[in-house]
Amino acid sequence: MPPGLDVGIVTPRFPPNIKGGGEISAKLLADNLYADSRISKVTVYSFDGDLHSNSGYDIVRLGDIRSEFKEWSNLYAYFKLNSRINKHDVIHSYNMCFHPVVGHFSEKFCIPSIATLNSYSFIRESTIGLNSRYLHSIYKKVSLNSSGRILIKKIRNIDNFIALSNSVKEIYENKILNGSNIQVIPNMIDTNFNTEAISNTIFQNNLIYVGRLSKEKGVKYLIGSLDYLSDEYSLVIVGDGSQKEELEKIASKRDLDDRIEFAGYIEQNKLNKYYEASDIFVHPGIWPEPFGRTLLEAMQADLPIVATNIGGPKDIVPNKELLCPPRDSEQLAKSIKLAEDMYNELDVQKYLYDNYHPSTITDEVIELYYETMKNK
């Protein structure tokens, strides 16, 4: 097994530019690869500005791409990466957008390539039960039947894929990557994300949701679940998004203003205080979410997790009896009551260490790098 791999990571954004959990996961990957003795060099290529920075490894920011048109984004990335990418032993494409151009370079330069499947960017939303914005849906419908076919063909040039959950693997195998090598490797926990879990001594009926406020997140069903819970239950909703105003109206219409706090967007380094003040984390998604980093954060705070039995969260939740059907406020409330009964009986730290610790995940990723190089 040859030592000292030189790894290139291609991603749309990289911290401190954070849009969601994908950027945090990309940085954790880069950090832990760089710290591993089997890796000699890590270079991150991102497209979110012009600054070059260093975290021990190189972070090369190649301009700012704001276009949602992946044809243009990949063409731009082609010219920016063409003279740089072939120096690496393996290329890892993260956060979906540039999978086509990475697949192209993998074939052109015969470079071993890995791509992480952490969203459904190249799959029509309607086929997985989602409704996207009207203009975006029109673009995607037209694109996937024309130029999108070229992009998908390029994606298929990638040697191996990492799916964040079994749900992602099944969807991609059924839709566009049938016959491709897809291995399930989840995201890793951030060991620097610390909470004191001060609420674990006394149960106070405090519920928390952390995430984007958009339709597919199912937050309105979580609000509805309070109708089936006593007035002692309160809910903090952390996050922002297109549905925030509508959700606030729903809460007011149900006379729940005194039981629900809309905390808005909270920076990552301040989130721990919200977890510490909570008793149960609830993830009411109604779509096959690829993963769910906030579930890991909540478990790090020793919170029991209630989630719907769809997408990545059903893989993550250790207590399967706390999973419930999507779009069902009453069943969500029943699962919340069950979580209360199980309070202080849940020990998830070993579960997190065995399945999501950086050492575990990094080992699996590096083993896949070597396997890919061997079979290229």
Image (cartoon, helix red, strand yellow):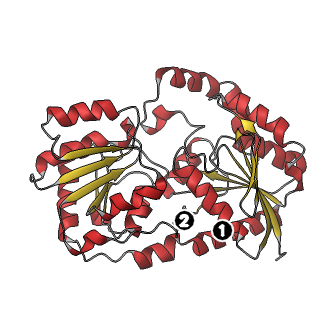
Residue 312 in the image, given as x and y percentages of width and height: 45, 55
**Amino acid type for the residue under numbered disc 1:** Asn
> Element at badge 2?
loop
Q: Which percent across, then down, holds residue 368?
A: 70, 66
Residue kind at label 2, given as amino acid type? Met
Viewer-nearest of labels 1 and 2? 1
Residue linked to disc 2: 188
| Residue 300 in the image, given as x and y percentages of width and height | 41, 69
Q: Quadrant of the N terminus?
A: bottom right
- Give the number of the disc on residue 178: none
Residue 32: assigned label: 1
Residue 65 shows in the view = yes
**Residue 145 x %, y %:** 63, 25
Crowding at dot 1, Cα within 10 Å, few <14 / some 14-19 / many 20+, comes out as some
One can see residue 317 in this view: no
Q: Is residue 144 above or below residue 317?
A: above
Q: Quadrant of the C terminus?
A: bottom right
Asked whether the beta carbons under mark 1 and mark 2 sit within 8 Å of each other, the answer is yes
Give the image quarter of residue 201. bottom left
Q: How dense is the environment of label 2, judged by Cα within 10 Å: few (below 14), some, or many (20 and up)? A: many
Q: Is residue 148 above or below residue 204?
A: above
